[in-house]
Image: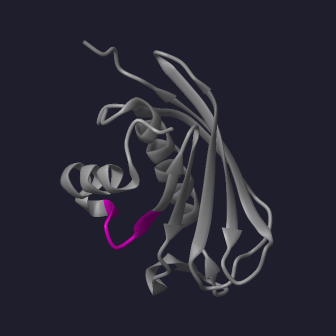
Amino acid sequence: MSVLSLAQIRQFLDREFPQVGGAFAVEEVGPMRARMRLIYQERHLRPGGTISGPAMFGLADVALYVAILANIGPVGQALTTNLNINFLKKPEPADLIGEARLIKLGKRLAVGEVSIFATTSDDLVAHAVGAYSIPPRD
């Protein structure tokens, strides 16, 4: 079971990170995982009519952050320390889904991966692995 519910995660993001609203949507949270949606907008396109790398990178980063928050609680200062992404296939202009899975969740460090899929097919379009620093808790 998650520490924070889906509704609590959404409220936290609305309050602390309003810039996420309209660009990303939290679809699911659970033990050691989260599912996010990149809401397609024309500004996400790169020349050639495909979703840009920075948009997919942002989806991976937010998905891992949400998975961490869902499992440790509302810690606004959990920070990305590393994020590597492999782009596997050009996605069509449409929403993307990021499925985050935490591999390690310690007191000071979290490590996870995100599989990014196009909503227009079942094809994996990108895969990311990231690490996050978790601040000490009182």
Q: Is residue 81 above or below residue 83?
A: above
- Picture quadrant of residue 52: bottom right
Q: How is the image coloured?
A: one colour
Q: Residue 52: tell me if it is visible.
A: no
| Residue at 79 percent of width and 74 percent of height | 122
- Residue sitting at 63 percent across and 37 percent down? 112
Q: Is residue 47 above or below residue 57?
A: below
- Residue 136: image x %, image y %? 33, 14
The image position of residue 18, as x and y in percent, is 24, 60
> Which residue appears at 38% of the width and 48% of the height?
5
Specify whether 50 is left or right of 135. Answer: right
Seen as rendered, the residue at the extreme left is 15
Q: Residue at x 24, y 12 (%)?
A: 138
Q: Nearer the viewer, residue 9 or 43?
A: 9
Q: Quadrant of residue 131?
A: top right
| Span colored in magenta | 20-26
x%, y% of residue 13?
Answer: 29, 53
- Height in image: 47 above or below 115? below
- Outermost front residue: 1
Residue 25 sits inside the magenta stretch:
yes
